[in-house]
Amino acid sequence: MLAKHCQACLWALFCFGSLVAESQAQSITALGDCHVHDGGVQYCQPLPTGEEVAVTTATATAAQQALPTAYSDCHGHDGEIFCVNDKGEDVGPIKVSTHTSETHSDEETAEEHAAHSDEETAEEHAAHSDEETAEEHAAHADEAEAAPAAAEKCHFHAGVEHCGPDTSSAATLTSCQRTARKYNLPLRIGSIFIVLATSTIAVGLPLLLSRFRRTSTWWLTTAIRQFGTGVIVATAFVHLLTHAALMFDNPCVGPLRYEATTTAIAMAGLVAAWAVEAIGERFVDARRTTRNNSISSSSIEKPLDAATASDSECGPACSPACDAAASDAAADTLSVAVMEAGIIFHSVLIGLTLVVAGDSVFTTLLIVIIFHQGFEGLALSSRIVALPAKLSTKLIMAAAFAVITPLGMAIGVAVRNSFNGRDRDTLIALGTLDAISAGVLVWVGCVEMWARDWEALRREPVRRALWAAFWLLSGMLVMGILGKWA
């Protein structure tokens, strides 16, 4: 009889505990503002109201950083409260504390109280809060502010902060806000001149070597040209197309109605580059045909004597050949101009996003961008130097590349305190420009540079072909490695 009474009492206590847990779970719908205290204990604020509660414990730094900053869908199970983390897993039981010893003794079993004592009692937590200085509280707030980035697996790539798509909805809503950062302004101003010097040296070196014909051998010229081709192709695929995809896949942009947005815009850039060159070449050919017709008519009416024709470097007798050479020169100049336009587009973005990146990654990005600009400068200059144009024209094209990235960095210094790299409109604008530039460089790199050069190289001896292939692949490899950071 006594045993039956005890069983009935235990069952009543269990039902009462379940009702209490269910009522508490109904009053707690989610947990927010989660942060880690000393000792690795994570505390969260019950929502919509309630006292701060201990959720879990993580001793390793990496494990603490991986903890989510919010939990949702809190519910009761067998007299205990559980909440759902960002991976859809139940976490708990959650120790709901009212900071009174009477309530603890009524609601907690001996085992729960022992476990709670191992983590931290409500009184100890209150004492811990009282003992914190203002500086410790500020540092704790900084850690809590940085926690969403860690929970969202955010990182800087090409100066823009990217977050993984597996974040919780609560974290995603707060991650799109601009993060206030402290910038080392003297370092950023000094880096403008460093990048300017690097770009100038890189784009000017082949021009300087071209003035000394003795050093401009076939082997050196081919190495620079093929290395530059590899750099341009890798820049298009590894850097620009990847950056554009990261921009459009950012959670702050939201779901896209057209999933192939990135590649479609890149294809539009490729078509635009082809159209500019095709129309330009037809225009040059039309002018050449008109000139030849007028020269033929004038030569019939006023024949030129042989002495004059022989003294003239490009007289009516050889005008078709001269016009063909001039047409090819114009086409080559147009091709290089299109390539430079694609490079300039993304160089502005590189300079801007480099300066607005946080101090924690700025030095690494600066080193990568220095190499990036150096290789791109060599690639562009190797094509400029081969143009049959005036030296002044070549210098103008080289100077445009040298100053464009520092110009973007100067813009970044001006807007550093207002630029939000996770703003939806900003991400779409950056992604669109990167994708267009990728398409332009795919056309120029693969068609105008790679395919055109190898039409001649395939007729060269095997030794020369292997030399060219080595430098082509080297350019791709080097820029591919730099794609890890920029």
Image (tube, rainbow, N blue to C red):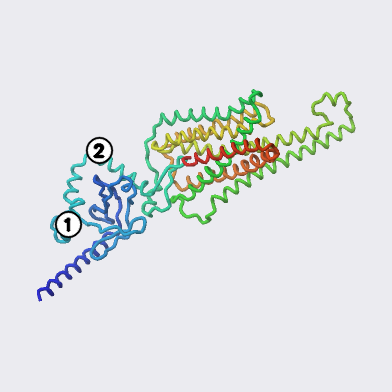
Q: Is mark 2 on a helix, strand or loop?
A: helix
* Number of other residues with Cα within 10 Å of mark 1, as a class: few under 14, some 14 to 19, many 20 or more: some
- The residue at the far bottom in this view is 1
Q: Which amino acid does label 1 sit on?
A: His
Looking at the picture, does residue 362 appear above or below residue 22? above
Callout in the foreground (1, 2): 1
Looking at the picture, does residue 24 appear above or below residue 182? below
**Which corner quadrant of the image does residue 464 belong to?**
top right
Q: In the image, is 113 to the left or to the right of 379? A: left
- Residue at x 30% of width, y 60% of height: 74
Image quarter (top left, top right, bottom left or bottom right) of the N terminus = bottom left
Specify whether residue 340 is in view: no
Q: Residue 199 — which label?
A: none
- Residue at x 27% of width, y 43% of height: 140
Say which residue label 2 marks.
135
Q: Is mark 1 on a helix, strand or loop?
A: helix
Say which residue label 1 marks.
113
Counting from the top left corner in percent of width and height, residue 148 is at 35, 48
Specify whether residue 177 is in view: yes
Q: Which amino acid does label 2 sit on?
A: Glu
Counting from the top left corner in percent of width and height, residue 441 is at 59, 42
Nearer the N terminus, badge 1 or badge 2?
1
Counting from the top left corner in percent of width and height, residue 156 is at 43, 42
**Which corner quadrant of the image does residue 395 belong to?**
top right
- The CA distance from mark 1 to mark 2 is 32 Å
* Number of other residues with Cα within 10 Å of mark 2, as a class: few under 14, some 14 to 19, many 20 or more: few
**Total residue callouts:** 2
Whether the residues at callouts 1 and 2 have beta carbons within 8 Å, the answer is: no
